Amino acid sequence: MDRLKRIKKVYKVFILYNEMIIRIADKNDQKELIEYLKHYNKPEIINNRVKCYTTYNKTIIAVEDNNIIGMLQWYIKENPNAGVAEFEEIFVNPNARGKGIASELVSFAIKDIKQSFESLNIKPRRIFLFTGKYNIAARKLYEKFGFKFIAELNNLFSDNEIETFYCLSF
Ligand SMILES: CC(C)(COP(=O)(O)OP(=O)(O)OC[C@H]1O[C@@H](n2cnc3c(N)ncnc32)[C@H](O)[C@@H]1OP(=O)(O)O)[C@@H](O)C(=O)NCCC(=O)NCCS
């Protein structure tokens, strides 16, 4: 069976980007995803988060040679009927950056969020996110997809960093 047929058999929704697969992570990816969240330091929190983001919430991954090289997590904020989701934990391995992988993850996630709400008969309304004021690569990435800068917020995740709040309206 050729590669594409094999992939189609295993995953319902995916895209091929160069030699990579962009797809929704599932339970089989949990072990590898744990490695991405090691900086949370507490194994129980990491395990719970990975479980949560491969069941109710979503993790979109870029996979090359069977290894995860980038990921983006998203979840539905508060009452699903509001049609609002947040992007979290967007990360591409340092040696794979600058090749459009984050762009593919963002593009996939926007479509996935839209379809997820629509499948529940809910009008998708907004995606929001926070990113560091001086994280130029991330800010440019989001702006490229139509996210609008809304506000700055001091001391959100630490006492000496400034976050920016971005929104994409459907
Ligand atoms: C931010 C990050 C996810 C971008 O990943 P990437 O795969 O390199 O991004 P892409 O190649 O898809 O680039 C997308 C856009 O981002 C911008 N960009 C990416 N790298 C950039 C850089 N070093 N400087 C300026 N802009 C940059 C560009 O606008 C680019 O679009 P273009 O190529 O059409 O001009 C990656 O640098 C990363 O993992 N950083 C560490 C984690 C992080 O900061 N996450 C975001 C926290 S909210």
Image (cartoon, rainbow, N blue to C red):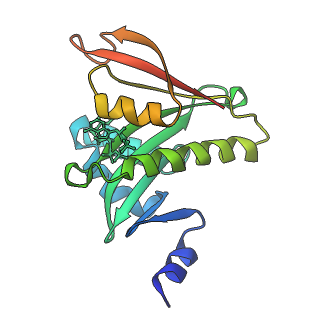
Q: Is residue 99 visible?
A: yes
Residue 140's image quarter? top left
Q: Name above or below for residue 169 compared with residue 48.
A: above
Q: Relative to 13, say whether 39 is above or below.
A: above
At which x and y percent is residue 105? 45, 49
**Ligand 1 quadrant?**
top left
Q: Residue at x 50, y 91 (%)?
A: 1
Circle count: 0
Q: Residue at x 48, y 87 (%)?
A: 2
The quarter holding residue 127 reads top right
> Residue 165, position in %: x, y?
44, 19
Left or right: where 56 falls relative to 37: right
x, y percent for residue 129:
46, 27
Q: Tell me where residue 106 appears, x and y as whole percent.
A: 47, 44
Q: Residue furthest right?
A: 121
In the picture, measured across the screen, residue 13 lies left or right of residue 162, that is right
- Quadrant into which the C terminus falls: top right
In the image, residue 170 sits, relative to residue 163, either above or below, namely below
Q: Is residue 41 visible?
A: no
Could you tell whether 140 is left or right of 86 in the image? left
Q: Residue at x 70, y 26 (%)?
A: 82
Q: Give the farthest residue toward the bottom.
A: 1
Residue at 46% across, 82% down: 3
Q: Nearer the viewer, residue 49 or 159?
A: 159
